[in-house]
Image (tube, rainbow, N blue to C red):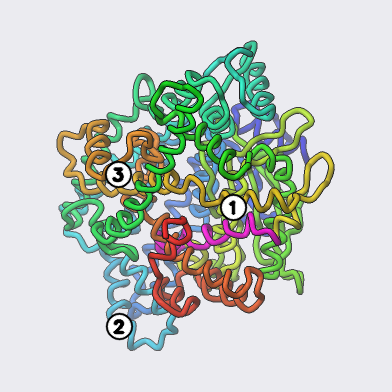
Amino acid sequence: MKAIRTLAVATLLGAASITTAMAHENPFLKPYATQYEIAPYSEIEISDFIPAIKAGIEEQDRNIEAIVKNRAVPDFDNTILPLENLSPILERVASVYYHFDNALGTPEFAALADEAIPLLNEASNRVNLNDALFDRIRQVYDRRDEMGLTPVQKRLVEKYYRQFAEQGAALPADKKKELVRINDELAKLFIQYNKNLLGATNAFYIAADENEVAGLPESSLGMAREEAKSRGMEGYVFTLHAPSRLPVLTNADNRELRRKMYEGYTFLASTGEFNNIPVIEKIVALRAEKAKVMGFDNFAQMMTSRVMAKTPEAAENLLMQVFAPAVARSAEEVADMQALVDAEGGNFKIAPWDYYYYAEKVKKQKYDFDEAEVRPYFSLDNVLKGLFDAAGRLYGIKMVELPDAPKYMDEVTVYDVQDAATGEHIAVFMTDYFPRASKRQGAWMEELQSAGLYEDGQMKRPIVYNVGNFTRPSGDTPALLTIDEVETTFHEFGHALQGMLTRAPYKSLAGTHVDRDFVEMPSQMNEHFAFSPELLKSYARHYKTGEVIPDSLITKLNNSSKFNQGFTTTELAGAALLDLAWGQHDGKNVDVMGFEKEVADKIGMPEEITFRYRSPYFKHIFGDDGYASGYYTYLWSQVLEADAWEQFEEKGIFDADNARRHKELILEPGDTEDAMVLFERFRGHKPDPHALLRLRGFE
């Protein structure tokens, strides 16, 4: 199987095709014949995508026509249910296309975007702006209380009606035409933004010699030596990928090396060949125009109206409740760092490129804790054992590896997620954890297949990915994760749990298809288990000796857990406030860097800290519309998560009844009920914002 999988990747990389006795069949055009209908990656060629997208659009058009020409009175079965499966072909090809676009964006594959994205955008327009289709949906919506629908069916009707209205279905013809133009232009700009970001990330590197790398751990140096060797260079090469960047900022004694890395990252995609600033200017202007077409004062107003926050003002109010105490705490953190600099005779003022480095020194001073002490206990294999053991104890599942399952890279691992008691298949889970030039930065969860009712009448289970950019193995040393990487592993698996455990009967309501400001709650909840002493004892073993992590290290790790929360919260809330400010921009005379400074001055951003993401690499909000005017949802969800976690602490984190209720009320329902109703049913009260302040150590 390994040779076949390597060939599949080689094909996607543009390697010469191999003549076979049988003509190639486009695998997207019919249901996959693989176990659990995992995409047959070894059979997929780059040339398959565009024909399959076009075939899917034709299939979609035929099914829309069948709905709108149906002479029967519109009802749930003849109008709403068919919308769940308008084009199985398009679903299959789009899910793989978007995944490869993020995780396997080779130059050959990336070249597809100029044709594929406009086609996919047109496919959406043909559905969302179809007058006859929306009229039938509206008729069902108007009669929903008279049709004997179940509560879940009624919610699905309401969701379709709301989503069609939000996408412009109720607009007059001239406004629809404007909307199509704007959406098409935005789609092209998103392509360019993402190409620039990947290009700029891969283009940047810092070459260093032995005299410049003092303080860096051997794991970082080994990776940098291998990077230099791969480029035909001597010494060390550092890149902007997190496993290379963060150790430099945290451990390098050479202040100039830290400055180069910091400025390389914070000015990423801001100049030259891969400059995203002109792209952002156009995106902001088009979004302002789109909001007006849709009847809103600004883009942020339009986007927040669709989720729990309802208004930009409500989102900003929550953010400022957290931002103000975070800034105050960060001032204390900077004072501690400055005192250390002065004591060492540094004769300089703490700058942004000093923050990670001196924060680590202060942490050692205050807590006698060095992250390097715990990394040997966090090999990726050990962390995954802890991750899966926790899920088993809490939710009664087990992970069974499928070594022969289709995969698009050899380093991908595939699991059959089963009910631990009965062996029943629950989901497929796939992991892809290491960086490469064709993969975007960050970590994320996505679905290849959603749970729910399909066109053949079958209830299918989900296929879910977790993707990351974690520290690779180096030489004889396995992948040893940082504390942040361990936390991220648990975070993304929290998303995966919501996707995998869902019991919602319809795809549009299943798993993570919930309000954006609720979707981050399960992921952030799952982070808490990572460093709980009880779980650490079960998985954190030294990769050389097998020794269980000692109690003294666990105590240090947890005592220091609230350290540096001023910085962490300030950069996160600052980025969320910047995002909302962009959403309220009128689109005229856009000055990207000037606007960032204006926002920073207005909110009181400390000069030692910048936004977690600056605009040219803020992919969450400019790479597509996913988190645009919605990045605040990470903190909104943290209020829910912090409050809910207090209940786990009160009852015991592995309390069986509490875990069962969390599974049944938070993870399984998807969007079958209102998120706030589900939360209050689980917690017994409305979310308490002070729970987040307590969690962060601000109260």
Tell me if residue 126 comes above or below residue 441 in the rendering. below
Quadrant for the N terminus in the image = top right
Front position in the image: 154 or 242? 242
Q: Position of residue 128 (x, y in %)?
A: 32, 58
Residue picked out by circle 1: 559
Q: Position of residue 277 (x, y in %)?
A: 30, 30
Q: Which label is found at residue 578?
A: 3
Q: Secondary structure at mark 2?
A: loop
Residue picked out by circle 2: 143
Amino acid type at image mark 1: Asn
Q: Which residues are magenta?
A: 513-534
Q: Position of residue 395 (x, y in %)?
A: 66, 69
- Identify the residue at image location x=60%, y=19%: 213
Q: Residues within 10 Å of mark 1 (few under 14, many from 20)?
A: few
- The residue mark sitting in front, 3 or 2, is 3
Picture quadrant of residue 60: bottom left
Amino acid type at image mark 2: Arg
- The residue mark sitting in front, 2 or 1, is 1
Tell me if residue 89 comes above or below residue 668 in the rendering. above
Q: Earlier in the sequence, mark 3 or mark 2?
A: 2
Q: How many marks?
A: 3
Q: Is residue 83 visible?
A: yes
Q: Main secondary structure of the magenta part?
A: helix
Q: Say if mark 3 contacts mark 2, CB within 8 Å.
A: no
Amino acid type at image mark 3: Leu
- CA–CA distance between discs 2 and 1? 58 Å
Quadrant for the C terminus in the image = bottom left
Side of 192 relative to 599 (left or right):
right
- The residue mark sitting in front, 3 or 1, is 1
- CA–CA distance between discs 3 and 2? 42 Å
